[in-house]
Image: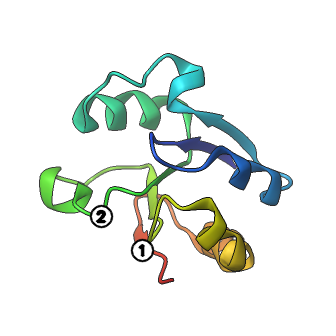
Amino acid sequence: MRILFDQGTPAPLRDHLPGHSVETAYEMGWSALRNGELLAKAEAEFDVLITTDRNLRHQQNLAGRRIAILVLPTTSWPRLQSITREIAAAIASLKPGQYLEVPL
């Protein structure tokens, strides 16, 4: 899968997602985009957006989106390290357009 990390998603997580192509919003030059603009751009090039923005589904209309969205419970890499298997499993289970929050 082609995965985009939103601002706040710890970059070291990419090392725990073998077999996936991972880019960050910063690497794409999209770090200044607002959520709606970022979603539109990401949807054209990626299968999954990984974010830590738990308010995204309340701020954006996600109906009809093709990109899957995975929301992480924290921006803290030390805390996420203990659940990297769960994150990888959640990514593997995602369907196009699905929204899923990973518990800590």
Who is closer to the viewer here, 50 or 96?
50
How far apart marks 1 and 2 lie (CA) works out to 8 Å
Q: Are marks 1 and 2 in contact (CB under 8 Å)?
A: yes
Q: Secondary structure at mark 2?
A: loop
The residue located at (70%, 78%) in the rendering is: 82
Who is closer to the viewer here, 98 or 33?
33
The residue located at (49%, 77%) in the rendering is: 102
The residue located at (27%, 38%) in the rendering is: 35
* Dot 2 crowding, Cα within 10 Å, few <14, some 14–19, many 20+: some
Report whether 24 appears left or right of 20: left
Disc 2 residue type?
Arg
* Dot 1 crowding, Cα within 10 Å, few <14, some 14–19, many 20+: some
The numbered disc on residue 51 is none
Q: Secondary structure at mark 1?
A: strand
The residue located at (22%, 60%) in the rendering is: 55
Residue on which the image places disc 1: 101
Provide residue 81's location: percent of width, then percent of height.
Answer: 70, 70
Provide residue 97's location: percent of width, then percent of height.
Answer: 40, 58
Looking at the image, tell me whether mark 1 or mark 2 is earlier in sequence order: 2
Residue on which the image places disc 2: 54
Q: Is residue 89 visible?
A: no
Q: Residue furthest right?
A: 18
Report whether 40 appears left or right of 87: left
Provide residue 20's location: percent of width, then percent of height.
Answer: 77, 49
Q: Nearer the viewer, mark 1 or mark 2?
A: 2
Disc 1 residue type?
Glu
Who is closer to the viewer here, 100 or 14?
14
Q: Is residue 38 visible?
A: yes
Q: Determine the image quadrant of residue 78.
A: bottom right
